[in-house]
Image (tube, rainbow, N blue to C red):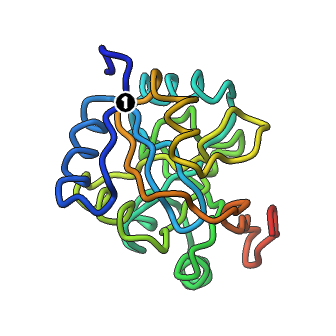
Amino acid sequence: MNTTHTAIRISASDSNAVTEAKKVIQAGGVIVYPTETVYGFGVDATNELAINNLNQIKKRTRPISIIVSNIEMAFSITILTQKQKKLVAKKLKEANTIIVPLKTGSVHQSISGKDNTIGLRIPDHGFGINLVRELCKPITTTSVNISGNPPINDPEEIMNSFSDSIDLFIDEGVLPHSRGSRILKLKDEYFEVIRK
C-alpha cells in the first residue's frame, strides 16, 4: 500500500488514530501499534497479500498470532467444547496468548499452525481492542523486529528500521522492555505453557 515508502506517524493519543489505522488495514497495509507488552505489526488476518508482506518484513514464515476484541469474537473463529470455552475465556481475560483449534476460513490459513490452530489474545490495551472492534475482524499481533532479534520498543529505532516497509506507526513512546505475552496451548482440557 505504501507508495511513498515513508510511514505516517500518529500519536496513540490522537483521536483519529484508530480511524487512520482502520483505513490502512482495510487497504491491505501494515501498521505498527502499541500493546501492553510490545509494539506489534498489524495486518488484516484474512488478507493473504498483507500477511505475505508482513512475513517479508519480518523475514519469517511461521504461524502468526492474532488479537480479537472480545470473547465472542474468539469463539466465532475457533472450535471449542463448552468446557473448553470456559477454560479459554478465563485465560483470555488475563491477556495471555492462547493457542486453540481454528474454524476453517475464519482467518487466512497461512497464519495458522500445521495442526490448524491459532494463537489469539485480547490485549490489555485499548488501542488494539478498539481497532479490531471497528474492523469487525482480527488483526495480526507479532513483535516489531526481524525474526530472531529482540522486539524493538523505541519509536525512533522502529522508524529507522521499518519506515520504508510499513504504512502507519501508532506511537506511544518508548515501551518498557518485555518478552511479550505468556503463551498457552490448549490440550483437550488443560493448558501447556509454551512461553512463560
**What's the residue at 37%, 30% (across, down)?**
7
**What's the residue at 71%, 39% (across, down)?**
114
Q: Position of residue 36 (x, y in %)?
A: 53, 68
Work out whether residue 15 or residue 103 is closer to the camera in this orientation and state it.
15
Q: Position of residue 145 (x, y in %)?
A: 65, 38
Work out whether residue 77 or residue 131 is closer to the camera in this orientation and state it.
131
- Most extreme residue toward the top, as rendered? 3
In the rendered view, would you say 182 is above or below 165?
below
Dot 1 falls on a residue whose secondary structure is: loop
Q: Residues within 10 Å of mark 1 (few under 14, many from 20)?
A: many
In the rendered view, would you say 51 is above or below 124?
above
Q: State the quadrant of the N terminus.
A: top left
Say which amino acid is labelled 1.
Ala
Q: Position of residue 30 (x, y in %)?
A: 40, 34
Work out whether residue 160 or residue 45 is closer to the camera in this orientation and state it.
160
Residue 187 falls left or right of residue 48? right
Q: Position of residue 81 (x, y in %)?
A: 56, 74
Which residue is identified by label 1?
7
**What's the residue at 63%, 65% (across, down)?**
176
